[in-house]
Amino acid sequence: MYERVLAPVLRSSQRSALVLGPRQVGKSTLLATLEPDLIVNLAEPGAFRDYVAEPERLSRELAAAPKESTTVFLDEVQRVPALLDAVQVLLDQRPPRFRFLLSGSSARKLRRGQANLLPGRIHVHYMHPLLVTELGSDFDLDRVLAHGSLPGIYSEADEATRALDLRSYVDTYLRAEIQAEALVRHVGGFARLLDLAAAASGRILNLNSLCKDAGISYETARRYLDVLEDTLVAFRVPAWSGSDRSSLVRHGKLFLFDLGVRNALLRRPLDRPLDDERGLLLEHLVAYELQRRLGTLWPEAALYHYRTRHGAEVDFILEVGREVWGIEVKAGRRADRSVLRGFRSLAQRTDRLKRRIVVYLGDRPQRIDGVEVLPFEQFATLLPARSTQRP
């Protein structure tokens, strides 16, 4: 089992926690390692029926729990949002009797169910597919670019089985459960939008074009994309605004949450990354390494992209406190001065640009006119692997 960067955060704190993330990223596995005294798995049909019919049952069961039982794990809590009211009552005790560990795959279901999200009482963390640091010596670039890094799929030794598992994940979870989550009436339109979102992944999002191609209204397309983001299946990297927005592209970039899922949706061969997509896939991987660290691991950081209407661009802008880092991704094994144009444009807009980094597939770091040129794995080691927050 892979050691997750969130594990020491949860182990070092006695605060209750809600861990949100897509299916099969390892939420249940991680929380189970904390050895809870009581586990309620709301994905089990029997447990779901019992608690959805009678949410107050949880309070009665905990009232009868022995004194040594102090940690309660509610798995897939979004299925019965009403249970959070009982959790709040128990957390309001001074001192609280229980520590609650909650997992969920849909912030949308919690909000739609008017769930009490327990502000100030519970820490919210997000869990993702595996980071390079979590894979450690198991990291294989081509394998990640083709199959992604969902733990159960990546750890499968047989390549053909990994491919079957990915296609099953796409068909049974994304196309069925997420479709149901969206309360979809136009099934064909949602299916087309999901495929188009996969094709647009890593690119600047043009929602008008997307809804026309999917054959659905602008408002419907916007709602479906909101569902993908609320279920953590997709995320956006917004455009960096700087001080003068008039000459900047204002639309964000859309990314699906895992490369294997993206490739399976697009029916790519899953035995290898396609050569003509290697640059785009590597850019995805850098986006994941950055975005998955925001919040718990790197609360002072924010992620953007930069592009002017004249074509100058930097793949990612990372604001770290008052500092700005520009990050450009190149899939080749060589780097030259052609990468400097975007950095020059960015430097004209801000005096806070402290680091200019090119991530590439070469073996050794270089420096070109003050620009750091780093192999991908070395770049990944620069990023936080432990939380900078105190419990």
Image: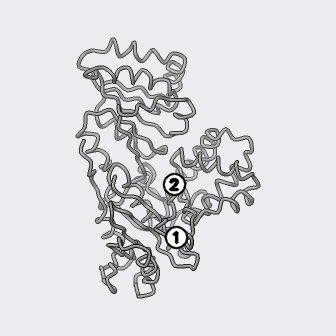
Q: Cα distance, mark 2 to mark 1?
A: 16 Å
Closer-to-camera residue (77/362)? 77
Residue 187 bears which disc, if any? none
Q: Residues within 10 Å of mark 2 (few under 14, many from 20)?
A: many
Q: Is residue 161 left or right of residue 87?
A: right
Residue 320, relative to residue 96: is it above or below?
below
Q: How many marks?
A: 2
The residue that appears at 46% across and 23% down in the rendered structure is: 83
Closer-to-camera residue (262/146)? 262
Q: Is residue 211 left or right of residue 242?
A: right
The residue that appears at 37% across and 57% down in the rendered structure is: 131
- Mark 1 belongs to which amino acid? Leu
Identify residue for label 2.
235
| The quadrant where residue 98 appears | top left
Asked which secondary structure carries label 1, the reply is: helix
Q: Nearer the viewer, mark 2 or mark 1?
A: 2
Percent across and percent down for residue 58 are: 42, 18
Q: Is residue 178 left or right of residue 292?
A: right
| The quadrant where residue 39 appears | top left
The residue that appears at 41% across and 67% down in the rendered structure is: 141
- Residue 50 visible from this viewpoint: yes
- Mark 2 belongs to which amino acid? Phe
Q: Residues within 10 Å of mark 1 (few under 14, many from 20)?
A: some
Identify residue for label 1.
280
The residue that appears at 29% across and 44% down in the rendered structure is: 7
Label 2 or label 1, whichever comes before in sequence order? 2
Residue 89, relative to residue 324: is it above or below?
above
Quarter in which the C terminus is drawn: top left
Percent across and percent down for residue 43 are: 50, 31
